[in-house]
Amino acid sequence: MTIFERYLIQQNNQYITSLDEPGKGHSIFVVIPCYNEPDIITTLNSLSRCTPPQTATTVLVVVNDADNSPQAAVAQNISTLESIANWQFNNTHSFFSVQRIYAHALPEKWAGVGWARKIGMDEVIKQIANNNLTEGIIVSLDADSTVSSNYLISIETAFKDNLQFNFFLINFEHPIGIDELSTPLREGIIRYELHMRYFRMAMEWSGYPHSIHTVGSSFALKASAYVRQGGMNRRKAGEDFYFLHKLVLLGHYGNINTATVYPASRISDRVPFGTGAALKKWMDGGLELHSTYSFEAFGHLKPFFLNSMNYWSMETDQIEERLSLLNPVLSLFCKNSQSLSQLIELKGNCSSVKVFQNRFFHLFNAFWILKYLNFVHETTLKRGELKAESVKLLQSRGIQASLNQTFEKILGIFRDLDKRI
């Protein structure tokens, strides 16, 4: 029994209906969750303009709704399925096949983008197993995103040139130069993307080695890595953050910066947080995008992560002393979160310093960092003004930046830096 077959035994696909026959022998699969989405054809057209990869490709569109979804959303989903069928009829010579999956009236408790992604990705595993393939590439995209013309061949080449890699993160840029954007909406999306890039880079600056962007529309992974990680979760939102930060524990990953995904710059109520939700709050007068995590808070983490392998050779009292010398609020958080005892237990379970160093950042990972950041901003520090904190981070890296520069200019600097990783 293969790893794919073992994985499938544990899954439940009773809620889905495939409206199209799957392709035979395909091994690149683009999975697109789609709920109440009026413009999926724009995404399909964008993919059709891509340079075709050598590998046979399928695009799986998971049209989904919950058992309590508004009737208007269900009606839009039916219309979407019809629109895709028309697109298939008019594009019979497309280099990729399109498979419509209808996941109707999912139980409200779990219905959402996470489950929709999981349904599509699990269907990929089923097709790989049925075709006796040893591997496949799962590409995660969104129904409101477009891509650069070299998108698919860049993904194909990245995996061919890096056989040991489990997944790749793909460069993304919200389209901020389109004429249809109002000035307030444009400002909101610039602020939102700047916050995302600041957060990733600040984690990197603190010494955390797995600081990655977690954008659901901008990653690709091996099917084997998908099943080894345990598959996608069913979270209603933030599924990408949790999935990708678990995936990094497998190691061997990289970035594709030669191609670009363009997530839509629009408001949305489809998920409780993320781009669309953040922009909706912004346009409604919310203040969240005015501020971000204080750069000082990331500075507290730096001495804790610095030379973390040294904890391996320390006695318990020495580790306790080192933690006590950290910033007081970080020391308190370590105490409250049982970090000392967890660190001692980790040390006892590792056979070498190399193993310890790797597992150290499995324990003190992005979830731990996020909990600390929330703790420190609830107890001690205030969130900082977004531009000011971003400038502090850039200046700490020796990059010229000032508060006199526009948000767009500062975002451009962060984009350029991210393309170098």
Image (cartoon, helix red, strand yellow):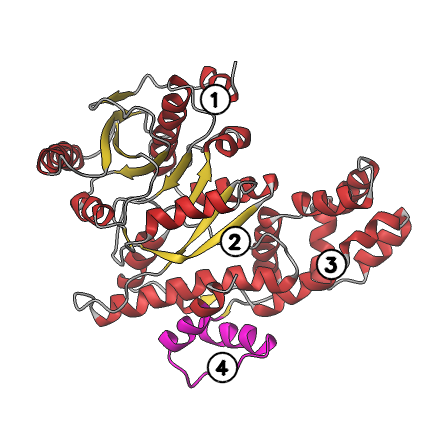
Residue 385 point in image, percent of width and height: 47, 73
Q: Is residue 339 left or right of residue 15?
A: right
- Tell me where residue 346 sits by quadrant: top right
Between the C-alphas of marks 1 and 3, the distance is 40 Å
Asked if labels 3 and 1 touch by Cβ distance under 8 angstroms, the answer is: no
The amino acid beneath tag 1 is: Phe
Label 2 vs 3, first from the N-terminus:
2
Mark 4 and mark 2: Cα distance apart in space: 23 Å
**Dot 3 corresponds to which residue?**
304
Res. 212 mark: 2
As helix, strand or loop, the secondary structure at mark 4 comes to: loop
Check the image and report above or below for 93 versus 417. above
Rounded to the nearest angstrom, the CA distance separating label 2 from label 3 is 20 Å
Magenta region, main secondary structure: helix
Question: Which is closer to the viewer, label 1 or label 3?
Answer: 1
Q: Which mark is residue 76?
A: none
